[in-house]
Amino acid sequence: MTQASARHILVDTEDRCLELKASIENGADFAQVAKENSRCPSSNDGGNLGTFGRGQMVREFDEVVFSAPVGVVQGPVKTQFGFHLVEVTGRQD
């Protein structure tokens, strides 16, 4: 089964998500931005979600994690929880 590891930042609005994405693209550290802004408990670990298989996350999140290039920040990704920035940190088949 394909496994992926990823980190994310979860916020309430698409606008905030876009602001944070721009900040990261301009050199801000993803982990630090997650610690300061994400409302997910994973923020304590820089947004790190560890390793998981297909189908273990909500569909919208899953689709991004198992198709996006490794190391490229994706988003905003809207789910029932809010808006995410997602970075795939690894994937193995």
Image (cartoon, rainbow, N blue to C red):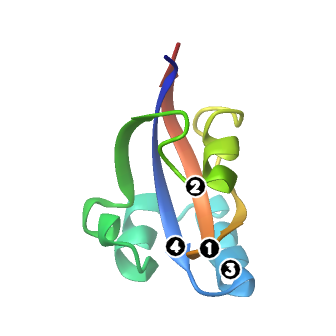
- In the rendered image of this protein, does residue 82 appear above or below residue 47? below
The spot of residue 36 in percent (x, y) is 38, 80
Looking at the image, tell me whether mark 1 or mark 4 is earlier in sequence order.
4
- Determine the residue positioned at 53% across, 13% down: 93
Residue 67 as seen in the image, left or right of residue 5: right
Spatial CA span between label 1 and label 4: 11 Å
Looking at the image, tell me whether mark 4 or mark 2 is earlier in sequence order.
4
Neighbor class of circle 3 (other Cα within 10 Å; few <14, some 14-19, many 20+) is few
Q: Tell me the amino acid under the disc marked 3.
A: Glu
Q: Tell me the amino acid under the disc marked 4.
A: Leu
Q: Tell me the amino acid under the disc marked 2.
A: Val
Looking at the image, tell me whether mark 2 or mark 3 is earlier in sequence order.
3
The spot of residue 61 in percent (x, y) is 62, 53
**Comparing marks 1 and 4, which lies closer to the viewer?**
1
Which image quarter: residue 79? bottom right
* The label number, if any, that marks residue 19 in the structure image: 3
Label 4, on which residue?
Answer: 10
Verify CB contact (< 8 Å) between mark 1 and mark 2. Answer: yes
- Determine the residue positioned at 59% across, 86% down: 12
Q: From this viewpoint, which residue is outermost toward the left?
A: 44
**Comparing marks 3 and 1, which lies closer to the viewer?**
1
Q: Tell me the amino acid under the disc marked 1.
A: Gln
Residue 76 as seen in the image, left or right of residue 39: right
Label 2, on which residue?
Answer: 58
